Image (cartoon, grey):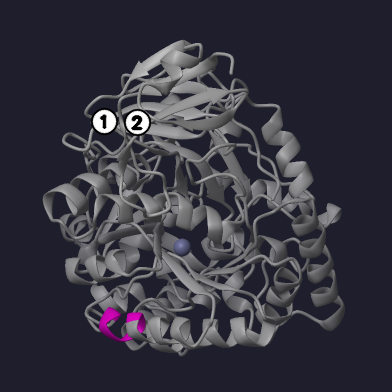
């Protein structure tokens, strides 16, 4: 044996399979791993670089199964925002993921992505994507186009994408509130099939969000059947995660059963006061299905607050026709009154976040033209202005051309812990790396928070179990062959962390602070983080699965 490019020596190897950690050295050569008995490498030729991992855990690189990072590296020409094209926050946004140990991001979640679309719909979608993703990130005809755009921008870690159903629907029908006609559904199936053939990771839906919410169950079954033919999962943000969460879970189960696609429930939660504690029913339901042999899994982020668009607090008809139509309706006092009534009384089939929680649980994360509103609740802003909360929200949406990000303090800790502890739950940040404001800290803190708070401090999870949820389990679910485990011949994506010090430092007021204790990150065989700081290496690629 000749020497290695890199040797990580003296650490506790936690290999991502869930098996107990053991002392071992790990060699890297030509982007692949070799597991060595302690000291063995020194007798076989050494290495160009040696990292001392004594007192540290050596694990596979983390797989973030749930991101909205579809466009963040595309925002600046240099890929890191250093040209100032995104107001200067881009560097921290791009960096946050790899600094917490993530070597593969899976975007295209919640039905929203940057492909696919019919050519004639691309210009209109490009304009909407500019608002949704915070800059001119483009929209692409298919996964190959998306991958080609990313290939032009060097990146530290790897990326792959699901096919978002909402984007697919808008890319064929436009953002309209009506069923797909048979020919349109055939076109959607064909576009989905093409992108899955090119390597997209699966199909995602966001059935709470327009335009995905305009689809009935049958439409999703037809699409999920295409994913099933590719052996790829159906990944869903359920139609309701609040008072009707159990019905929404049953719809997802029906879609999986009828289509034959494996089911993955995104960021499983039971939010809002009427649903708190409901994980005591949803999790046993999932466990029973698994016991019957059904392939169903989920992911979770370790926080009791979520984050989404302010427009999603309004009834679905308010968003019919897209952002332009929404802002026009918000200018009409009679339409505002209809929205107020819908929130007070509910609309069948619609997850009514404000009706389930209240405007005092909704705080502004990002409103670029109203920085002083960021961090404050809608209820508080309305009280200060002597205004009705719906009018406050509507005025803000109009002034921001429809795009305001919010943080919704909607969950209780017991539910989060129950989901985290379930043996089929993996970890996904649900990070939304968009320039400006105060985004949810999960984009910078999720993985260290699980290892620090839920493993070391609370003992909710064992170390090996937690690492498995972040690596091997996730790679198996999404078909990341040769990743998520440390074994001979696997891809050289690694994290070296200090189990005594690892912790998230990002908060709601300082949301992009890098974590403590993530010392070294290796992606594609190169050291991309050393001593907790980026090295500048850019070995990342778009993974076609
Ligand atoms: Zn979601």
Q: Residues within 10 Å of mark 2 (few under 14, many from 20)?
A: many
Whether 273 is drawn above or below 197: the answer is: below
Residue 429 visible within the image: no
Between 176 and 241, the one nearer to me in the picture = 241
Q: Give the number of the disc on residue 56.
A: 1
Q: Tell me the element at label 2.
A: strand
Q: How many numbered marks does the figure carry? A: 2
From the viewer's perspective, tell me whether residue 515 is left or right of residue 104. Answer: left
Magenta-colored stretch includes residue 436? no
- Where residue 216 appears, as percent x and y from the top left, is 63, 84
Query: In this image, 496 relative to 322: left or right?
Result: left
Residue in front for this viewpoint, 241 or 56: 56
Residue drawn 25% across the image and 46% down it: 451
The secondary element bearing badge 1 is classed as loop
Mark 2 and mark 1: Cα distance apart in space: 6 Å
- Residue linked to disc 2: 496
Residues at circles 2 and 1 in contact by the CB criterion of under 8 Å:
yes
Q: Which residues are magenta?
A: 279-283
Residue 421 to residue 151: above or below = below
Residue extending farthest to the front is: 43
Mark number displayed over residue 441: none
For image coordinates 20% across by 54% down, the residue present is 454
- The answer to whether mark 2 is within 8 Å of ligand 1 is no
In terms of sequence position, does the residue under pointer 2 or pointer 1 come before the other?
A: 1
Residue 35 x/y as whole percent: 47, 33
Q: Residue 388's quadrant in the figure?
A: bottom left
Asked whether, in this view, residue 449 is left or right of residue 345, the answer is left
Residue 379's spot in the image, x, y percent?
21, 63
Secondary structure mostly seen in magenta is helix
Q: Is residue 444 above or below residue 427?
A: above
Magenta-drawn stretch contains 280: yes
- Kindly tell me whether residue 430 is visible in this rendering: yes
């Amino acid at each position: 044996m000749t020497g290695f490019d890199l040797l990580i020596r003296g650490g506790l190897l936690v290999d991502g399979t869930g098996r107990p950690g053991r002392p071992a050295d790990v060699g890297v050569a030509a982007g692949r791993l070799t597991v060595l008995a302690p000291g063995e490498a020194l007798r076989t030729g050494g290495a160009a670089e040696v990292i001392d991992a004594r007192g540290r855990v050596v694990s596979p690189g983390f797989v973030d199964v749930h991101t909205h990072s579809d466009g963040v590296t595309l925002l600046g020409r240099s890929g890191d925002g250093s040209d100032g094209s995104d107001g200067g926050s881009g560097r921290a946004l791009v960096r946050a993921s790899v600094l917490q140990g993530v070597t593969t991001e899976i975007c295209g979640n919640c039905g929203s992505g940057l492909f696919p679309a019919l050519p004639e719909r691309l210009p209109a979608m490009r304009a909407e994507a500019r608002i949704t993703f915070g800059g001119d990130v483009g929209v692409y005809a298919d996964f190959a186009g998306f991958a080609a755009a990313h290939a032009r921008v060097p990146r530290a870690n790897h990326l792959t994408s699901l096919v978002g159903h909402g984007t697919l629907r808008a890319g064929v029908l436009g953002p309209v509130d009506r069923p797909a006609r048979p020919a349109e559904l055939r076109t959607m199936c064909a576009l989905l099939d093409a992108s899955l053939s090119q390597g997209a990771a699966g199909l995602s839906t966001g059935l709470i969000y327009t335009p995905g919410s305009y689809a009935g169950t049958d439409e999703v079954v037809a699409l999920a059947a295409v994913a099933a033919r590719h052996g790829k999962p159906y990944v869903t943000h359920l139609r309701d995660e609040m008072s009707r969460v159990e019905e929404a879970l049953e719809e997802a189960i029906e879609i999986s059963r009828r289509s034959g696609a494996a089911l993955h429930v995104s960021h499983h939660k039971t939010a809002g006061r009427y649903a708190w504690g409901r994980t005591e029913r949803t999790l046993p339901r999932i466990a029973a299905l698994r016991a019957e042999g059904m392939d169903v899994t989920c992911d979770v982020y370790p926080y009791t607050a979520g984050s989404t668009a302010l427009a999603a607090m309004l009834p679905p008809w308010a968003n019919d026709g897209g952002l332009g139509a929404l802002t026009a309706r918000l200018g009409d006092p009679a339409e505002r009154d209809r929205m107020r009534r819908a929130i007070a009384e509910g609309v069948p089939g619609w997850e009514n976040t404000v009706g389930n929680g209240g405007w005092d649980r909704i705080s502004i994360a990002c409103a670029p033209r109203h920085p002083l509103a960021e961090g404050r609740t809608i209820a508080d802003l309305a009280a200060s202005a002597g205004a009705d909360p719906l009018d406050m929200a509507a005025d803000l949406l109009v002034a921001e051309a429809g795009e305001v990000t919010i943080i919704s303090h909607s969950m209780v800790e017991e539910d989060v812990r129950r989901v985290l502890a379930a043996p089929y739950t993996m970890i996904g940040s649900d990070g939304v790396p968009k320039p400006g404001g105060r985004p949810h800290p999960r984009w910078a803190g999720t993985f260290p928070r699980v290892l620090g708070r839920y493993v070391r401090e609370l003992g909710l999870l064992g170390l090996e179990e937690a690492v498995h949820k972040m690596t091997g389990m996730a790679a198996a679910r999404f078909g990341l062959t040769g990743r998520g485990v440390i074994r001979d011949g696997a891809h050289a994506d690694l994290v070296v962390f200090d189990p005594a010090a690892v912790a998230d430092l990002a908060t709601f007021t300082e949301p992009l602070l890098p974590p403590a204790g993530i010392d070294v990150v290796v992606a594609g065989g190169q050291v991309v983080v050393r001593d907790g700081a980026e090295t500048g290496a850019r070995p990342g690629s778009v993974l076609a699965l």
